[in-house]
Image (cartoon, rainbow, N blue to C red):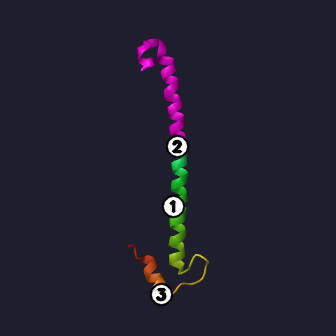
Amino acid sequence: MALLAGGAASHGRRIALLEETRVMLAERRRAFDAAEAALEGKIDHYRELIAAGLDCDGAPVSEEVRQRQTARS
């Protein structure tokens, strides 16, 4: 509100605040992108395990477990 009251004299400070916000948003976007990439990696990893019929430790799973692995509920 103080910047609004400052009129045209505060335009430079307004730009600075907007640029700071832009930097903050870019940092948040990078963090979200990294989190999404990690999530996609985990999903791919589990899909590969299921496709190969393996448990997390690399051991084969039974047919019963394979059927449950593909169930989504």
- Is disc 3 in contact with disc 2, using a CB cutoff of under 8 Å? no
For the residue pair 73 and 19, the one nearer the viewer reads as: 73
The residue to which callout 3 is attached is 63
Give the quarter of the figure containing the N terminus: top left
> Which x, y percent locates residue 58?
61, 79
In the image, the segment drawn in magenta is 1-28
- Is disc 1 in contact with disc 3, using a CB cutoff of under 8 Å? no
Mark 1 neighbour class, 10 Å CA radius: few under 14, some 14 to 19, many 20 or more: few
The reply to whether the magenta stretch includes residue 61 is no
Picture layout, residue 24 above or below residue 54: above
Picture layout, residue 46 above or below residue 64: above
Picture layout, residue 54 above or below residue 35: below
Q: Residue at x 51, y 61 (%)?
A: 40
Q: Earlier in the sequence, mark 3 or mark 2?
A: 2
Q: Residue at x 51, y 87 (%)?
A: 62
Helix, strand or loop for disc 2 = helix
Q: Earlier in the sequence, mark 1 or mark 3?
A: 1
Helix, strand or loop for disc 1 = helix
Q: CA distance from mark 3 to mark 2?
A: 43 Å
> Which x, y percent locates residue 47?
50, 71
Give the quarter of the figure containing the C terminus: bottom left
Circle 2: residue type: Arg
The residue to which callout 1 is attached is 40
Q: Residue at x 52, y 71 (%)?
A: 46
The residue to which callout 2 is attached is 28
Q: Earlier in the sequence, mark 1 or mark 2?
A: 2
> Which x, y percent locates residue 35?
53, 54
The reply to whether the magenta stretch includes residue 18 is yes
Circle 3: residue type: Glu
Q: Is residue 17 left or right of residue 4?
A: right
Q: Residue at x 48, y 12 (%)?
A: 9
Residue farthest to the front? 2
